[in-house]
Amino acid sequence: MEFAFVQSGLLGWYLDSEVVSAEEVAALLKRRGLLDGMPVFLDDETMMPLPALSEWGRYLSTGLLDETTLRDYGPMAARLDGYLAGLGSDVLSATEADLVAYRNWRRLWQRKPVAARTWGKEASILDDLYGFLVARGSLPAQLVRLAARGRNALAPGVRSNMDIRHLAFEQYRYFRDVGLGGQLPDEQVNRGYRGWAPLRNRAGSDLALGTGARWREWATVLLPEMGLWPGMQGGSSEFEVQACAKYGKARTLYVPEDAAASADLFCVLEPPDIVRAAAGTLERKARDLFVVAGVDVAGGVVRGTLDGVDREFRMSAMLAKLRRITVYEGEFGLEALTLFVCRGGLMPGADAWKGYRHRAWEWMTALADSTTPHLPAGRWRWHDLRHTHALRLLTYLENLMDGEEPDPKARSRRHHTYLTGHIRHNPPAPAHRRAPHQREPLQRSPDQPRHNEPRLRRPRRLGRPHRHSRQDHPRRVPARRHHRRPEEAAGRQDPGMHPPGEQAQGRCHRDRCPPPRQRSPPPAARQGRLNHRHPDPAPPGSSAPLLRFDASCHWVP
């Protein structure tokens, strides 16, 4: 079996036929809704599409998956078919034993066995493949039996923990200045540094930490979004990301002034040499680029020519693939509209940024000495800067709350409620084990109350009806008391609901029992006040409630 991807941009370069033109094929792909990156599985001899697997590839394409996702899913099915071909089988005629053998080969026997997390992703894709074949009618049933609770038996049985790390201030300075910036640990210039464009790498790290954005969000930012465009004031900026955000969910990013200044310094010093050297190459590729003719900064719109057609895009809706080929006419010719540029004159890709980070780690470990801050066993990742941003932001907000709270006990009690409070009181524990979604027990400080100790609850919103809780009220008795035994119901009946004779005997007839009483809310609750709450239990010998509200709707002890 041969494996390929759909890539409509290459039709004009490689399709040379008198029967059909490249424009007609590209129009047909758009008409059928076949996206770039859709996997295509071909027969070795006839080079015709295999019906079952190619239908699955089209099923993935119609699911509007990202191109990079499609390029990850296709090779997994092709790898399985290649292994089954060595066993004299294929995807449709495979058995459960064949799939188990393939799992063992991937996890144990191949030259470089994959980790459990990698195999878990591949197992879910193969399960989706065979589920599609069963729904299509190509197979009568799933090949692999279901495990407990409907779990995929091929997937790893143990769920892996999330690897969440954050950097201290000294660690970040060492990562940015020594690893990415080409300096020595004593802040002197490293004459032996063999890196390239250190200001770009430093600006990328500052932007990642200052915005708290994911890699695809800050690495694909455009110059007008950063405020680095003629007629704009510069400094801190805000812009919306949508197409490059996770799940395509729109949100607003704020770029602080220090991160914007670092990006401005890079734009002044390093890009001119890069753009001047790549101007000729971009001129020859102009037909494949999106050449911008005008930018509407206020409306967030760019206008230009793409594939010989005048187009208009909102900057927030531009995909990373389109941003990479977006250029404008500058001082030296065509220049990239993106903030970051590499040797080719266009935006660096994921592999390029990964190489910058790996080379930075090599310099960090080579220059480490006694003054170097602690370095973990694994390399720092760009996403670790996002975790650092979130942690520092929570710490800053808690410091603001501390300034408004005069009671030390109240501050201590609140710190045990938030994640950063646990981090402060339990610094040795890793951050991912304190995350709420892990649902692992947190270490309790000596002054932290236990779960069964009473705590102060937050006041409710105005007009919200009261919800009874077990701490405040005893267990309710059933509305139909005639279901109890006579000896239990003898002393609990309401004189207003039962005749005196039947009450004494402990008997009740269903036809003579009135319907259960409907408890109406107190008048104060209907007026939207807060004093309709049932008071908390008072201590023995006292009739005053333990807690009450003041005029600002806060608890007052």
Image: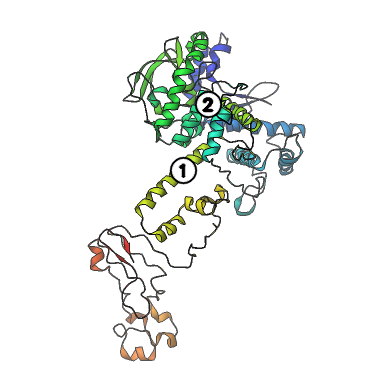
Q: Relative to 283, say whether 131 is above or below.
A: below
The answer for how far apart the CA atoms under marks 2 and 1 are is 22 Å
Judged left or right of residue 481, residue 444 is: right
Horizontal and vertical percent position of residue 509: 36, 83
Horizontal and vertical percent position of residue 322: 47, 22
Horizontal and vertical percent position of residue 311: 39, 18
The amino acid pointed to by label 2 is: Asn
Question: Which residue bears the numbered disc 2?
Answer: 201
Q: Residue at x 54, y 21 (%)?
A: 197
What is the number of the mark on residue 241?
A: none
Question: Which residue bears the numbered disc 1?
Answer: 392
Horizontal and vertical percent position of residue 163: 58, 43
Q: Relative to 479, say whether 416 is above or below.
A: above
The amino acid pointed to by label 1 is: Arg
Graded by Cα atoms within 10 Å as few (under 14), some (14 to 19) or many (20 or more), the crowding at tag 1 reads some
Q: Residue at x 42, y 23 (%)?
A: 264
